[in-house]
Amino acid sequence: MADSRSGRRGSYAKGVAKREEILTRALEVIAREGYRGASVKELADAAGLSQAGLLHYFGSKEELFTEILRKRDELDSAAFGPDGEHPENHDLRDAYVAVLGHNADVPGLVQLYARLSVDAADPGHPAHRFFLERGEALRGMFADEIARRQSAGELTDRIEPAALARVLQAVADGLQVQWMLEPDVDMAATVSALLDALDPRPAAEGDAR
């Protein structure tokens, strides 16, 4: 007699794999078609499912979009994080700038992030907890790096690490909105200029940092 637990594990694993496939396809569609072109029908077609079949895995369009953003963060971390595939960006400052530069290549995902972040201000929205936890984790990483750089004299200590971490988060989010309105805005260069301005070292020395 077959072990029913083995069958359940197999079914669960297949479900997880299908969710991952859906998210991968959805990221491709949004990157290609933009946020406005990413209807549930388009995403379902890309995954080879009906709309009802797609929502079976996520419950609602909002939950699907939340998981798409979570998947995007996972891929960005794999590419630009400390153990990522771009060793030149293992410094947090460089990774921060690199991610903003990369975002300019995926406008649909930037649009999705901006729209969902506003909707998620409602505590009842499926993305509310995601944005709270994401922001807390991001600021924690920033604050640790800021404190380290302040101790090394590489960053002004006139602003507390936690406050400056929140400013840097706000700069990234705000720049993305400006960029959507004015595509010529160079987000990466703007953030680099800000970080240079916060470096208290003389310009000649700071240029080599």
Image (cartoon, rainbow, N blue to C red):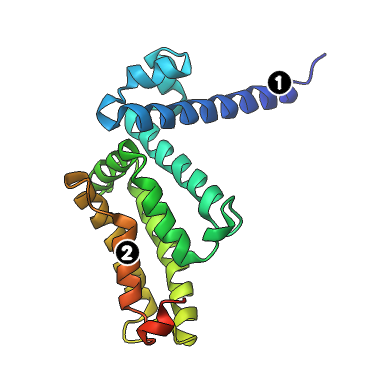
Are the residues at dot 2 and dot 1 in contact (C-beta closer than 8 Å)? no
Q: Residue at x 45, y 87 (%)?
A: 153
Q: Which is more toward the observer, 124 or 18?
A: 18
Quadrant of the image occupied by residue 198: bottom left
Left or right side of 167 for 7:
right
Q: To which residue does mark 1 refer? A: 7
Q: Position of residue 30 (x, y in %)?
A: 35, 30
Which mark, residue 44?
none
Q: To which residue does mark 2 refer? A: 191
Left or right side of 162 for 173:
left
Q: Position of residue 87 (x, y in %)?
A: 59, 57
Residue 174, placed above or below residue 65: below
Q: Earlier in the sequence, mark 2 or mark 1?
A: 1
Q: Position of residue 93 (x, y in %)?
A: 44, 66
- Whether residue 113 can be seen here: yes
Q: Secondary structure at mark 1?
A: helix
Quadrant of the image occupied by residue 172: bottom left
Q: Secondary structure at mark 2?
A: helix
Q: Which is more toward the observer, 194 or 115?
A: 194
Residue 141, placed above or below residue 54: below
